[in-house]
Image (spheres, rainbow, N blue to C red):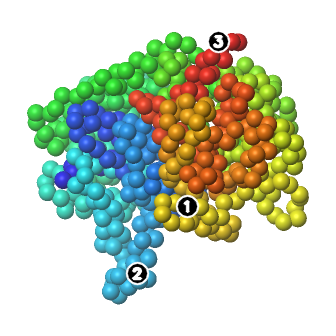
Amino acid sequence: MARFIFITGGVVSSLGKGLASAALGALLQARGFSVRLRKLDPYLNVDPGTMSPFEHGEVFVTDDGAETDLDLGHYERFTGVAARQTDSVSSGRIYSTVLEKERRGDYLGKTIQVIPHVTNEIKDFIGIGEDEVDFMLCEIGGTVGDIEGLPFFEAIRQFSQDKPRGQCIFMHLTLLPYIAASGELKTKPTQHSVKELRSIGIAPDVLVCRSEGPIPAKEREKLALFCNVRPDSVIAAQDLKSIYEAPLAYHREGLDQAVLDAFNISPAPKPDLARWDDVADRVYNPEGEVKVAIVGKYTQLEDAYKSIAEALTHGGMANRVKVKIEWVDAELFDREDAAPHLEGFHAILVPGGFGERGTEGKIKAAQFARERKIPYLGICLGMQMAVIEAARNAAKLTDAGSEEFDHEAGKKRFTPVVYHLKEWVQGNHKVERKVGDDKGGTMRLGAYDAALKDGSKVAEVYGTNAIEERHRHRYEVDIKYKDQLEEQGLIFSGMSPDGRLPEIVEWKDHPWFIGVQFHPELKSKPFAPHPLFRDFVRAAVETSRLV
């Protein structure tokens, strides 16, 4: 039966609870334990699937088709444990489930209340799969004191009381602000945060404090005294140059040992940190640098492309180079020539997205990469825009477009090279969708198989002809234009097993030009870079040597 670690936050948001949870999971793995990580979000959206990237950042997708918080990406990248639908829940989903049960009469006419019905639903969720691992790490989104988070805090308090003594602990992450004018590191916000936590019946066993520098012994003793934790359970979380140093940094501070001590696990297995030593060495000791342009529409918020940025870093680590990313707003090219903005880059990546804004700029970026023989990776919409560019400029279908942008009948005439997918096969059953369906959860989501063409670039990159990758999209490239495009050199090198849906395209006479309908960045890890990103960065290195 699993031991449970509940990770909460205080003082301010965005302190890095997800990263701390992921790093702790990696450290427990290094000591030989199995782990699973979960995220409990207090917002009322059912999931992040319909939220703007500017509002919430990236939507991370699991193999089984869940649209989740980006923190699950951290969990996977640090532990290698594939996330599942049962690893992410929001208040919206909890309340939706409770109301569905009430409508069915499952509560036998009782008055439905936050306690016990909502909290019981949360507890049921937390306990899913508890017999599968040694440790279950559950991160509570937001900060203590948020009104929407109260049911979750009450639920984990109850959960810890329901379990045998010593089976649950609480880890609280806070901020120690440094006041430059007085030269002081202030502990009072953390004291108040812990006081708020204790007022609802939760006492932290481990205190993780974000700070710009080390925590002096005097402040550490003060925190231990006023927050009622052991001095060796006050853990400093200093700012790092790379997130991939976090497991080593937290180990040096004694986080994993403090957690094991809180569970009375003694003697603790010694950790094997060779994997993370190698990762840190590759991050901090590159042997070169390449410049990659990410041409997107959400460039003002880098978290919108979090997994892509990390996957590029992983590709750089595999090639022992530093990948310098520059964010380029695709809308610039709607009005201007792309060349002045893309000159000097060793590779170009066009990511996914939704809506018409910036699409003409993405098409111009694909054209620039094709004509200049610059390595190009198009992901999801980035693949679709590359196909439309090929249709317009190579196959002479000058009115080529997408139903996503030109779906209104009579608005204008266009050739729908990209169309709205209305049905497809998932596993052993057929899925059907309509244009007017709800937005949430109605895309082709999760892992799907693809068959790669013999002798193709992608088959060489993957080292196999059968792959499985994660999808998140509503629109597909229409296969009826396949022959026209292949005559011009755009090869459909990856297809769905039934041969109906294009998964990968590549230019025949190009050093490295690949577009994929799926999201390879979601499966990349620092110790296991995704093959596409590894080879994409390798191609960028080759380009840098030719400049």
Residues at marks 3 and 2 touching, judged by CB atoms closer than 8 Å = no
Give residue 64's position: percent from left, percent from top: 45, 55
Q: Is residue 49 left or right of residue 334?
A: left
Q: Is residue 186 left or right of residue 464?
A: left
Secondary structure at badge 1 equals strand
- Label for residue 425? 1
Q: Earlier in the sequence, mark 3 or mark 2?
A: 2
Give residue 325's position: percent from left, percent from top: 61, 27
Residues at marks 1 and 3 touching, judged by CB atoms closer than 8 Å = no
Q: Earlier in the sequence, mark 2 or mark 1?
A: 2
Q: Is residue 430 above or below residue 4?
A: below
Q: Amino acid at mark 1?
A: Val
> Which image quarter: residue 535?
top right
Give residue 477's position: percent from left, percent from top: 70, 50
Secondary structure at badge 2 equals helix
Tell me what residue is drawn at x 54 percent, y 55 percent: 445
Tell me what residue is drawn at x 32 percent, y 47 percent: 36
Q: Earlier in the sequence, mark 1 or mark 3?
A: 1
The residue to which callout 3 is attached is 545
Q: Mark 1 or mark 3: which is in front? A: 1
Q: Residues within 10 Å of mark 2 (few under 14, many from 20)?
A: some
For the residues labelled 3 and 2, the Cα–Cα distance comes to 65 Å
Q: Mark 2 or mark 1: which is in front? A: 1
Q: Residues within 10 Å of mark 3 (few under 14, many from 20)?
A: few
Q: Amino acid at mark 2?
A: Glu
Tell me what residue is drawn at x 73 percent, y 37 percent: 490
Tell me what residue is drawn at x 40 percent, y 29 percent: 527
- Label for residue 102? 2
Q: Residues within 10 Å of mark 1 (few under 14, many from 20)?
A: some
For the residues labelled 1 and 3, the Cα–Cα distance comes to 45 Å
